[in-house]
Image (cartoon, rainbow, N blue to C red):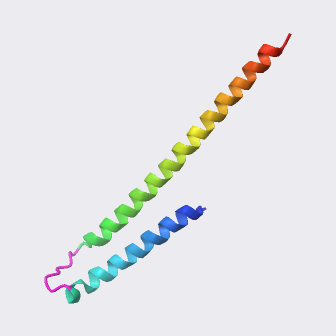
């Protein structure tokens, strides 16, 4: 399931991806010297950027979650140590 931030990221890159098809198709009429590559390098570049951006975004979220969990563990360990010290 996509989070709202992820949905926005995918909407932006979906627009760029679809736009790259249009630019690749209409490039010759818009730019006289345009030579559309047969493998669609523009589309491939946008798609690769999309994938890399998504994984970097996920990595950042995972790193933040790990930091939160470490903080929770440290607080729990401190509470446990304080409780052990209080026992007679």
Q: Residue furthest right?
A: 88
In the figure, is residue 12 to the left or right of 75? left
Residue 52: image location, x then y, percent: 39, 57
For this rendering, which residue is in front, 86 or 13?
86
Q: Main secondary structure of the magenta part?
A: loop
Residue 43: image location, x then y, percent: 32, 71
Residue 63: image location, x then y, percent: 52, 43
Against 17, residue 33 (above or below) is: below
Q: Which residues are magenta?
A: 31-38
Instruction: Report the residue at 79% width, 20% height from top.
Output: 83
In the figure, is residue 76 to the left or right of 12? right
The mark total stands at 0
Indicate the quadrant where residue 21 lies: bottom left
Against 85, residue 78 (above or below) is: below
Q: Residue furthest bottom?
A: 29
Q: Quadrant of the N terminus?
A: bottom right
For this rendering, which residue is in front, 25 or 8?
8
Q: Residue furthest left?
A: 33
Indicate yes or no whether the magenta region holds residue 4: no
Against 14, residue 58 (above or below) is: above
In the figure, is residue 68 to the left or right of 82? left
Instruction: Report the residue at 34% width, 67% height from top.
Output: 46
Indicate yes or no whether the magenta region holds residue 37: yes
Indicate the quadrant where residue 86 lies: top right
């Amino acid at each position: 399931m996509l989070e709202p931030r992820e949905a926005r990221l995918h909407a932006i890159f979906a627009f760029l991806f679809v736009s790259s098809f249009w630019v690749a198709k209409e490039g010759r009429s818009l730019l006289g010297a345009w030579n559309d590559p047969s493998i669609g390098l523009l589309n491939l570049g946008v798609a690769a950027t999309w994938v890399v951006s998504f994984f970097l975004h996920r990595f950042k979220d995972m790193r933040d979650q790990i930091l939160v969990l470490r903080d929770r563990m440290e607080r729990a360990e401190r509470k446990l140590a304080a409780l052990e010290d209080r026992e007679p």
